[in-house]
Image (tube, rainbow, N blue to C red):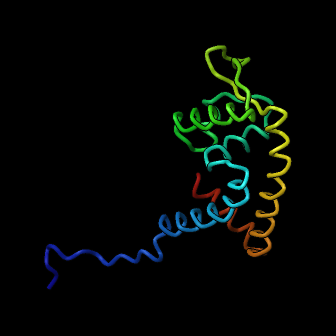
Amino acid sequence: MARSTDLPRFDLAHFLPYRLSQVANQLSCELQASYEDAGLTTAQWRVMVHLSQSESVSVRDIEQQVSLEKSKVSRAAAHLQQRGLVGKGVDRSDGRLVALRLTDAGRELMAQLLPKAIAFQSMLEAKLGAEAENLHRAIDTLQG
């Protein structure tokens, strides 16, 4: 007879949120080695990557795109600005917003780091083979 305090059986090893988090953390740690040598934190790396794909981006847009809190984006941007990798200005479309852009030094650094990230992506896709496209579709489905 089941007691009212009996808990349902739960298989953490097959719990998708847990497994996805574990894989994301593992891959993030592996990739981190490529940008950590350049003295970048994960937050700084995410900001730099996002800026490398745009001319100028507001802090608000970066927050939304890289899944970081405003305070973390602001701290990362301030540190990157101190290092001369990022410049700040007023957003052209909304003068109330701060816009960030890569400096020449920031572009030079990303020219060194992005090929490493691309190689990491290629390695993952080679490891997955035909399953890579299925994984992309599954992630798209989960993100709705």
Compared to 112, does 48 lie above or below? Answer: above
Q: Residue at x 67, y 27 (%)?
A: 58
Furthest-top residue in this view: 95
**Number of marks in the rendered image:** 0
Is 129 on the left or on the right of 6, as rendered?
Answer: right
Q: Position of residue 25 (x, y in %)?
A: 57, 63
Give the image quarter of residue 132.
bottom right
Is 34 on the left or on the right of 74, as rendered?
Answer: right
Q: Position of residue 2 (x, y in %)?
A: 16, 81
Name the residue nearer the viewer: 63 or 16.
63
Compared to 34, does 50 lie above or below? Answer: above
Quadrant for the N terminus, please.
Answer: bottom left
Give the image quarter of residue 35.
bottom right
Q: Residue at x 71, y 20 (%)?
A: 89
Q: Residue at x 71, y 28 (%)?
A: 100
Q: Residue at x 81, y 45 (%)?
A: 109
Compared to 85, does 32 lie above or below? Answer: below
Compared to 73, does 136 lie above or below? Answer: below
Q: Position of residue 69 (x, y in %)?
A: 52, 38
